[in-house]
Structures are given as C-alpha cells and as structure tokens.
Amino acid sequence: MAVRFAVKLNGDNNIQRCTQAEMTALVRETIRQYGIAPSVVLTVGSGNLGNLSDTRLKAGAAGSDSTNFDTAGELADVSTVTVNFDKIVQTISNISTLESGDDDYSFPLYLDGSNNLRAMTLTDVYDTFVKPAVLLMCTSDTGTDQAGTYTITSSTSAASGETLVSSTAVFTDTRANAGAYTAGGLPETVDQPTTITNYYLHRIDPAAEATIVRPLVHVLANTDRIQMYPVTKLRDFLRHAIQRAVESDEHTGCTIRYSYSSSVGSNISVNSRGTAMLDTRLNSSTRLTNQVGDDYRAQEVPSGSAGTISTHRLYIVRS
C-alpha cells in the first residue's frame, strides 16, 4: 500500500506537503463526487439480485356435509402461500481506465524520500484517495460518507440526506388476515392476505460542495510546467478515479457490489444496509363451523400469533 501526501503551494508560494486534514478533505470530496454519479447503480424493476420470499397462511378448502360438521381430520389443512420478490436491479457501468481521460495532467505530485517531486502512480492514486473513500462508504452507516450507496427503509418518505429510488416496494411482508375469516362467511375465500410492511430502496445523497486544497500537478499538454490542479479538473479526476475503481476489479478493496446474502465469495467486508425486511406469518389454525339448514359447513382457517419466518437484508459488499 502506497499512501502519499500530495504537495501544494503555501501562502509564500513554497512547495509543502498537504496536511492530514487537507488529505482527508480530498478523500471526502472523492466520496462526494461518487455520490453525484455512482458507477454501480440500483434501480427498481425486474431484478437481478435474486428472490426474497414472503410467506403467509391460507385456509384449507371448506367442507360441507348434510348430517354433521367435518372433523379437523376430514378437513383440508391450512397451507402456505409463497410470493417471491425480485425487484432490485444492479447495473454496473463500464468506466474507461483512468489514464485515458486525464492525459493533460500528471497524477498529483508528492515528495519522495529525497525531497524530489514525483507524480503518483495509478496504485498511489487508488491507495491515497479511493480506497480510504470506499472504506468509509462500505459501512452500515447512512450519512454523507456513504454518498451514492443504497439503503432500505419501511417508508416512502425519504429521511434527510436520502432520495427515494422508487415508490414500488422491493419487498412486502403479508400475513393472513385472521379477522377476515368468519363462521358466517363459510365457505370463505382461502387466501385473504393483509399487508404488514412495505420496504423501499433509497440512495444516500452527497454532501454539499466544500473548499478543497489543489495539489500540484505536472502539466503535460503542449507545455512542461508544474502548477496547481484546476479545481474543476481535480474534481473530475477524483470522480473518474472512484467510478473506475468501484465498478472494476482493478484495485483490491475498492470494488463495490450489492447482495441479499452476507456470504458472497471472496470479499473484504460485507455490511447490512438499513432496515431488516421481515417475513412474518401466523402460527396456528382454527376450525370454523356454521349450519345453514341441513348444510353443515366447516373450514380450517389461519389464526394464532405472528412470528418471524425469515429476515432479509440488503448488503453492501467490498472486495
């Protein structure tokens, strides 16, 4: 790992190393630039992350007899309805290599052990600016240090600093509506669900623009001089660097992907994002009976208390 301290011009136009605070601000600017234009994007549609299953009970088929009520053993049991949700679409951009878009300037300059000015290598750029940014981005937190990444909530009202991706739920927890099954309604419709919780995808917003130090660079286009990096070009450079590193496998520890699984092969860190998506279900059944003339009606219907069957999560994966 080669973390470098970029150099700048101080107030007396002398070359000196940037401070730790200035380097940290450049890392956070790298995050901000990613938040403006992420290269791994999640949308809501026909998904490619896999299925999240919601289960609920439904009633058995009703029984009818002219002499007596069917016993529990004679009736069809309640059974499970499973609905699969595959809503999140992960799209990975194809970003050009860093050198191909930044040929007017060298990478930022630093002082080597002999106090000679050197241009950072591509590995230096990733280790100095991008990897520290990605380390901050790939936690379970959901603040501006995670700009451009995603989280799950149970509300369409985005929290401060977040943007709702879609009003279509990425997962819905349903249960049998036990109160909808009545003896007087026999034979009841077997599947009578009620929605318990909808879950939605949000993207975390970038921080507001802040002042950043302008490292020295070697100008390569039509001249041969050292100058401060133009601020617009500097921001473009940082955005290009992190976009490329995040979408590619070019530098270990800088690639970002999303998954529903916490075990996804070779990775460095896996962290859950936002609210856990719960699949809950009633745990029992009740036999309802009703006599209408010489028609003895009976049916097994869902009842009992709710329990959690599965806990689904969105994970951010760094590799």
Image (cartoon, rainbow, N blue to C red):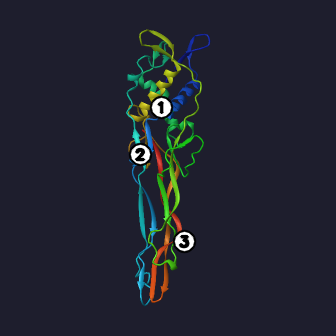
Q: Provide residue 27's location: percent of width, then percent of height.
A: 53, 29
User: Rounded to the nearest whole Å, what is the CA distance between mark 3 and mark 1?
Assistant: 54 Å
Q: Which mark is residue 179?
A: 3
Amino acid type shown at disc 2: Val
Tell me which residue sits at (44%, 86%) in the image: 295
Q: Nearer the viewer, residue 216 or 61?
A: 61
**Looking at the image, residue 319 lies above or below residue 84:** above
Q: Quadrant of the N terminus?
A: top left
Q: Characterize the local packing of mark 1: few (<14), some (14-19) or many (20 or more) Cα atoms within 10 angstroms.
A: many
User: Rounded to the nearest whole Å, what is the CA distance between mark 2 and mark 3?
Assistant: 37 Å
Sequence order check, earlier mark of 2 and 3:
2
Q: Nearer the viewer, residue 233 or 30?
A: 233
Q: How many marks?
A: 3
Q: Confirm or deny contact between disc 1 and disc 2 (CB under 8 A).
A: no
**Looking at the image, residue 11 lies above or below residue 48:** above
Sequence order check, earlier mark of 1 and 2:
2
Q: Provide residue 275's location: percent of width, then percent of height.
A: 53, 51
Q: Which mark is residue 131?
A: 1
Q: Which residue is mark 2?
A: 89
User: Rounded to the nearest whole Å, what is the CA distance between mark 1 and mark 2?
Assistant: 25 Å
